[in-house]
Amino acid sequence: MDLALSQRTVFISGSHRGTGLVIAERFLQEGARVIVHAPEPAMLADLDPRFDLRVTGPLWNDEGAHSVIEAVKALTPELDVLVNNYGTAAKGEWLDTTSDQWRDMYEHNVLSVSRLTQGLLPKLKASNQARVINLGTIGSTRPNATMPHYYASKGALANLTAGLAKALAGDGVTVNLVSPGLIRTPEVEAAYLKIAQKRGWGDTFEAAEASIAEHYFENPLGRIATREEVADLVVFLASARASFINGQNIAVDGGALGIV
């Protein structure tokens, strides 16, 4: 299947690690020109040298985001895809999260996206295959009892995505939100493997995965999503094959949202 991504220019925020890095690798495999990003230069030091287009800067304040936007503009005369992957989570309970913690979550998960999108939209509008793809969580529509500031910010991101898709009517830019559940990152795998070993579910993640999913992320498939599965959806949404998918919040959760 030709995704028509060869030589398309893609910018992925927070692509120095985790799922963002796998997304960047997938785009590279499709022949795209990939601009990677990290908050600090040192975070890109060990990155594959194939990622030769790099920008750095914090996205959680106006100054940092402006510097990133200007750096992207300096690197490329055109931009076809903006993947707003950067975001962060923080622990907290309803009775102890402070106003500063709530504001911090919105700076990282909502305003970081609005800043980049506002700054790069003029370039995107010039493309004939323009895409904005935001990374969220299924918690945007089904939040947990804890981390209220995090889930509220991701809920706002879902709202932002839908509103932006309507605002760009007639401009040929599609806007979608990819909302994973639990993702099998190295950090998640290590944390849950410790729990699994203590509970006698198995000595490897593969042996314990079904039990981990049953107790911590119940879904009909009985396992955890890989980073590659999330990345593949992002790449598809950026492709020519997804030109009529717009304004959607797409769950990557093995059917977890279907469980009541």
Image (spheres, helix red, strand yellow):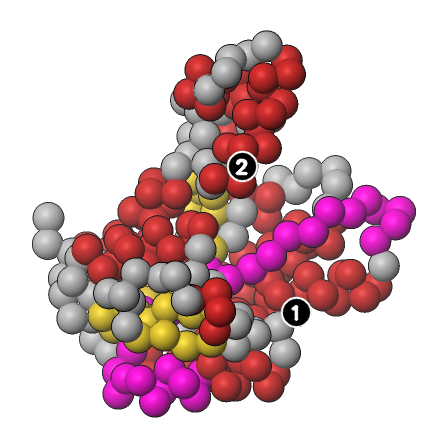
Closer-to-camera residue (49/146): 49
Quadrant placement of the C terminus: top right
Residue 125 drawn at (x, y percent)? 31, 81
Q: Number of marks in the image?
A: 2
Quadrant of the rendered image containing residue 221: top left
* Magenta-colored span: 69-97
Q: In this view, does 184 lie to the left or right of 35?
A: right
Provide the residue designation for mark 2.
188
User: Would residue 259 be visible to someone looking at this image?
Assistant: no
Give the prevailing secondary structure in the magenta stretch. Answer: loop
**Crowd class of label 1 (few under 14; some 14 to 19; many from 20; radius 10 Å):** many
Q: In this view, does 180 lie to the left or right of 141?
A: left
Closer-to-camera residue (173/83): 83
Q: Residue, x 67% and y 65% (percent of image)?
A: 106
| 161 w.r.t. 144: above or below | below
Q: Is residue 247 magenta?
A: no
| 183 w.r.t. 175: above or below | above
Outermost residue toward the left?
2
Provide the residue designation for mark 1.
107
Q: In this view, does 108 lie to the left or right of 236?
A: right
